[in-house]
Amino acid sequence: MAAEHRIKMENSGVRLPADMPWFEQQIKQIRHRAWLLRQCLRKGKRPPVLYVWPEFPSKRAALYKMARSLGWELTNVPRGAALGGIRFEDTTEQFTQNSTWPANMQSSRVWNDQCSDIRKTTLERAHVKAFGYGMAVNPITHDGLMVVKSDENAKHDGQLVQGPLDSENVCSDVVYQLNINNRDDSGRYYDYRIVWIGGQIPLIYQKFKVPDARFTNATVDAKILPDVSQVLSNSELEAIRHLTSIMCVDYAELDALRDRQSGRLFVVDVNPTPWGPPAGLNRASAEEAIHRMAQCLKDQLLPSSK
């Protein structure tokens, strides 16, 4: 290959946790470099770069799959010519001491950079502002069933308890919420998982669960709903836009329930580091979901590609 067409491969690795086993680190580095080399040889140049920080996403992460679908390099090793950046930190309260955005990436467009707290108590306050109602109840005065679960994100540890509770039985590290009736006509419980990418919703997943797994992440069936207008009203879309703005979320997947009696929509979790597509989708639907999400990501980061 002539000198002017040589492909520079420096900084072609990724930054991995220091406590990751050495052998696993080597496998991940080899896998990343091999993929990058194939892309370079195929196109004759390095692929576009999407920068993530501080963590490098698992291959099960939706963002990883979108980048691969687009042929983009996903890396947390600083690049001067990245399409943009996404803060990717799998914690409930983000901005750990090692997560300061690198100085040489300050000029890049950064998503989720100010999304520093996704606790359910924080979500509740944002929900009330955005929707005009929330899901929290006072466990000492609420008369009836209520859901108690960890204030941290993605614990899937919800339980039903009967209220009211004595004050000495109320815990400070959990939340107490309405018992939202999100059953369908067959008796299964279902969640909506709303994919939010740069202010757009390319699709919504509908995930079905048996009653015994209602508060877990175990699904028995799932489908994609590409026509968002059939799921969300204009006022709900505007409320979601307001909620994500309050929580400084540019990229995330939102878990939402619709109450069977009131018809109200409740956003119960915000996940800025989602895995997906969810279990229960057939292969064709999963591939369609990745394609739709990837195209939406491309349209937001490369507007001229629309």
Image: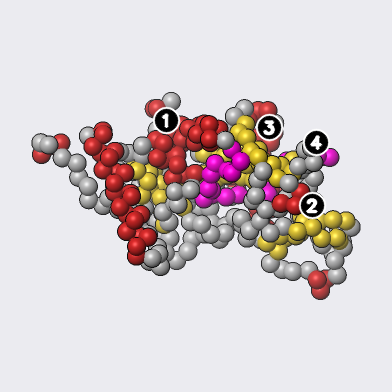
Mark 1 near mark 4, Cβ–Cβ under 8 Å?
no
Mark 3, mark 1: which one is toward the viewer? 3
Q: Which mark is residue 267?
A: none
Check the picture and name the quadrant holding the N terminus: top left
* Residue for badge 1: 303
Q: CA distance from mark 2 to mark 4?
A: 21 Å
The one nearer the camera, 275 or 119, is 275
Q: State which mark lies toward you, 1 or 2.
A: 2
Residue linked to disc 2? 178
Indicate the quadrant where residue 65 lies: top left
Residue that label 4 marks: 185
First of labels 3, 2 by sequence position:
2
The residue tagged 3 is 231
Q: Position of residue 147 (x, y in %)?
A: 77, 56
Q: Nearer the viewer, mark 1 or mark 4?
A: 4
Q: The residue tagged with tag 1: helix, strand or loop?
A: helix
* 234, 25: nearer the viewer: 25
Report the Cα–Cα distance between label 3 and label 1. Answer: 26 Å
Instruction: Say which label, 3 or 1, has the lower sequence index.
Output: 3
Alpha carbon separation for disc pair 1 and 2: 41 Å
Measure the C-alpha gap from mark 3 to mark 4.
Answer: 17 Å
Q: Kindly identify the amino acid type of the residue bearing the numbered disc 2.
A: Leu
Amino acid bearing label 4: Asp
Q: Residue furthest bottom?
A: 168
Q: From the image, give the main secondary structure of the stretch colored magenta.
A: loop
Residue 270 among magenta residues: yes
Magenta extent: 260-281
